[in-house]
Amino acid sequence: MLVDDNREFREVLAALLPRIFDVEIICTFERADAALEHLHTHPVENVLVDYKMPGIDGITFIERTRALNPPPRVFLVSFSPFPDLRETALRAGAAGVINKTEVQEELKDHFPPLKS
């Protein structure tokens, strides 16, 4: 699952990630509240969520996913993952904090490569 209010970024990641990693992008959302509602009835293993979005931000989204059973593995994505944000996200339950400009490189430690 991808959650980001930037349509272009969502579309690029949705097209790119399955070509590089052994992952399937099941759904994308522009808003975190809609993604949370979907997760209550359609569990997923992994979520990439943007930090700054209208309505619910990425940190709040991460905190709320902890109540799901089972909770997904959530990665916070940001153009500027400064140290305080990284610490806050990890405390909230994030599996990692990913820099948007280096998403391919930073995700390789978390997802298996695509088998050739």
Image (spheres, rainbow, N blue to C red):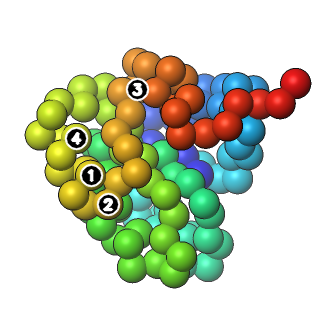
Residue 108, image x and y in percent?
A: 56, 29
Question: As drawn, is 78 to the left or to the right of 8?
Answer: left
Q: Nearer the viewer, mark 4 or mark 3?
A: 4
Spatial distance from mark 4 to mark 3, Cα to Cα? 13 Å
What number is the disc on residue 100? 3
On the picture, is 90 further left or further right than 40? left
Query: What is the spatial separation of the Cα atoms under label 3 and label 1, in whole angstroms?
Result: 17 Å
Q: Residue at x 60, y 60 (%)?
A: 45
Q: Is residue 54 visible?
A: no
Name the N-terminal-most of marks 2 and 3. 2
Q: Position of residue 70 (x, y in %)?
A: 54, 76
Tell me which label, 3 or 1, sits earlier in the chain: 1
Question: Which disc, if any, is residue 86?
Answer: 4
Measured as percent of width and height from the top left, residue 115 is found at 83, 30
* Mark 3 residue crowding within 10 angstroms, few (<14) / some (14–19) / many (20+): some
Assign a secondary structure to mark 4.
helix
Q: Which sits in the foreground, 22 or 40?
A: 22
Instruction: Tell me the distance, in whole angstroms, between the alpha carbons under discs 4 and 1.
Output: 6 Å
Residue corresponding to mark 1:
90
113 horizontally vs 30: left or right: right
Per the image, label 3 sits on a secondary structure element best described as helix
- Distance in Å between CA atoms under marks 2 and 1: 5 Å
Residue type pointed to by label 4:
Arg
**Residue 74, relative to residue 76: is it above or below?**
below
Instruction: Please provide percent x and percent y for residue 18.
Output: 73, 34
Residue behind mark 2 = 93
* Residue at x 56% of width, y 70% of height: 38
Q: CA distance from mark 2 to mark 4?
A: 11 Å
